[in-house]
Amino acid sequence: MTRRKGVDRIFIPMYMNPCTSRSFGLSLGVLLFAALAGGLPAAGADDHGDTPETATPVVIGVTTSGQHEIAGDTDFFSFDATQSQYYRIETFDLESFPGGSQSDTVIYLYDSDGQTVLAADDQSGSQLNASKILWGCSRTDTYYLEIIQFFSTATGMYKFIIDPIFLPPDDHSNYPDEAATALVIDGTPTGGTIEVQGDVDFFAYPAEVGLFYDVETFDLSTSSDTLLALYSPDGMDKFLEDDQGGRQTNASRMIWKATETARFFVRVSQYLTAGTGDYSVGVREEGIASLIPALFVEGGTPVSGLLPEAGDIDVHSFEAGEKHFYEIALETANGQNNFELALLDTNGMTILAENDFSESNLNWQAPADGLYFLIVREDLQGGSYDLSVWDQGTPPADADLNDDFKVDHSDLYLFQAEWQKVYPTPTPGS
């Protein structure tokens, strides 16, 4: 990330532990500041260097004053930080020059190379237009801080302080690595807490290719609103993410098919960057999908199923043909049931369509040949159901003129245009 001036409002929340950065909002708490005695400095010569090479050294825990004497001015500072120590970096006492605009700071924290941005913040400070970063140091070294005005045409004065702070112990790893907490694949809950704003918790479990898994958060505290994410075995790619799919208010849930036999990672965080709270997370193996026979799909013959308990799921699969229309129906004799149905793509992850009893049955056209999946769930009490997938065939030949896998008014307009080329409308007198 490169430094920018006069840009949109900046807020870069980081969720790492010592080794990276966090940027926190206003609810971090009331903070005490050490202020230097004396009045505000007057505008004049540049008080601090404009590059990392000319940065002003500052002492941890001591307030430093600065001013942007002219539009576009930037101030650089250097400081020594200790590995695994957290620091609060915050501006305050922002003042304008007589007749000038209101001071409005933006702060950038750079690595020891003076180039790599570790964190940046605009308006998270405790005072109006002030800035604040909470940062965990990855190694003992010298780091750099740049302070600018949000508006490139503005000037102003400010103070800032870099204070060591102490955070609650983190209960789970913040990284998708060997330190991630292992989950038991039988639904056994593992408790967790997002102790501070921007925290994340990583878990891991072994998955077998072709099997479906059900990951869910529950037992949320009043303030908790979880966000679940599934990561690849190397921890680099995020495959899935869910916010409100769980059975409880603000809980999350992901149902997916393993693409390989490997150890996958699950991340739990709060939906709001400033959120904190308790939760439990669990994972269950659901096995392989039950294939609906091709003859059943041809005639729309239903298959029966039973979910013994609330929250259970069944996974079905069916072979679909490219551009074929399918009517998918889910029926139950119990009017108290609240079944939900989701259609997944051939990868067993991507949701193509969803349906519940507040809507009509699913009507869907397959974009390509392949094996597709249906997830049946009932969160209130479980129950029996009948599920049918009925192949309606393809649209009339050439009706889908624009090849968008549906026949609609766009195709009619194209047909009319082609008709005019063959049978043009006669002109008067012809």
Image: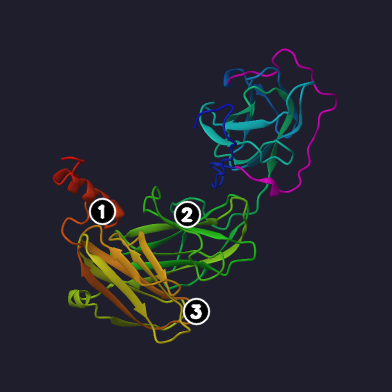
- Please give the range of residues in magenta: 23-51
Cα distance in 3D space between marks 3 and 1: 45 Å
Disc 2 designates what residue? 179
Q: Quadrant of the C terminus?
A: top left
Look at the numbered discs 3 and 1 and tell me whether their residues touch, using CB distance below 8 Å: no
Q: Residue at x 22, y 60 (%)?
A: 323
Q: Which mark is residue 412?
A: 1
Task: Examine the residues drawn in magenta and state their main secondary structure.
Answer: loop
> What color scheme is it?
rainbow
Residue 18 lies in the magenta stretch: no
Q: Is residue 167 left or right of residue 385?
A: right
Rendering coords of residue 382 (x, y %): 44, 82
Upstream in the sequence, badge 2 or badge 3?
2
Q: Tag 2, which secondary structure?
A: loop
Kindly give the residue lying farthest to the left in the view shown.
Answer: 422
Q: Which mark is residue 380?
A: 3
Q: Residue at x 62, y 51 (%)?
A: 274
Q: Tag 3, which secondary structure?
A: loop
Q: Tag 1, which secondary structure?
A: helix
Upstream in the sequence, badge 3 or badge 1?
3
Rendering coords of residue 280 (x, y %): 54, 67
Q: Residue at x 59, y 30 (%)?
A: 143
Is residue 139 visible from the viewing direction of this image?
yes
Q: Nearer the viewer, mark 3 or mark 1?
A: 1
Residue 45 lies in the magenta stretch: yes
Kindly give the residue lying farthest to the right in the view shown.
Answer: 38
